[in-house]
Amino acid sequence: MLELLLVIGGLVVIGLIGLLAVVLTPPLMVELGLWGLAIGLLIGIPTGWGYHVVLYRTLAVRIGLPSRWWHRPVELHPLLTPREYQEVRPWFVGGALGFFLCLAGGVAAIAGMLMMRFYP
């Protein structure tokens, strides 16, 4: 369900970026996009790191984690108890928010640069 909401949210943001492309000037789009990217990195990197640390510390006590478990950590969520999941979830959501901001900011900055290049 969360993945579906992220996809729908991403599509809405892409649509809004297209709408804003008509309203905003390309240099302003690039600037706002880079700010969104920077804020996403500032949020996403620490919370993503924290998510992996908390998930590892929670599960390593009980089970032996598979090698390269960090490639697909969401697959380990069913192994968490409800209490453990409540401890991991804020870090997971924070990392997802940071990733989403990076994605939206990057798309906005690229769209602004392309507009400056091809539509002077």
Image: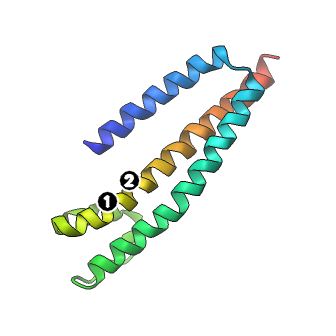
Q: Which three-letter amino acid code belongs to the residue tagged 2? A: Val
Pointer 1: residues within 10 angstroms few (<14), some, or many (20+)?
A: some
Task: In the displayed orientation, state which residue is furthest to the left.
Answer: 81
| Cα–Cα span, label 1 and label 2 | 6 Å
Residue 88 picture quarter: bottom left
- Residues marked 1 and 2 touching at CB (< 8 Å): yes
Check the image and report above or below for 90 versus 81: above
- SS of the residue under disc 1: helix
Of the numbered discs in the image, which one, if any, rests on residue 93?
A: 2
From where the camera sits, is residue 79 visible? no
- Identified at 47% across, 62% down, the residue is 47
Check the image and report above or below for 37 versus 118: below
Q: Which three-letter amino acid code belongs to the residue tagged 1? A: Arg
Check the image and report above or below for 92 versus 70: above
Q: Quadrant of the C terminus?
A: top right
Of the numbered discs in the image, which one, if any, rests on residue 30?
A: none
Check the image and report above or below for 24 versus 7: above
Q: Nearer the viewer, residue 39 or 5?
A: 39
68 with respect to 44 (left or right): left
Q: Quadrant of the N terminus?
A: top left
- Identified at 65% across, 15% down, the residue is 23
11 with respect to 61 (left or right): right
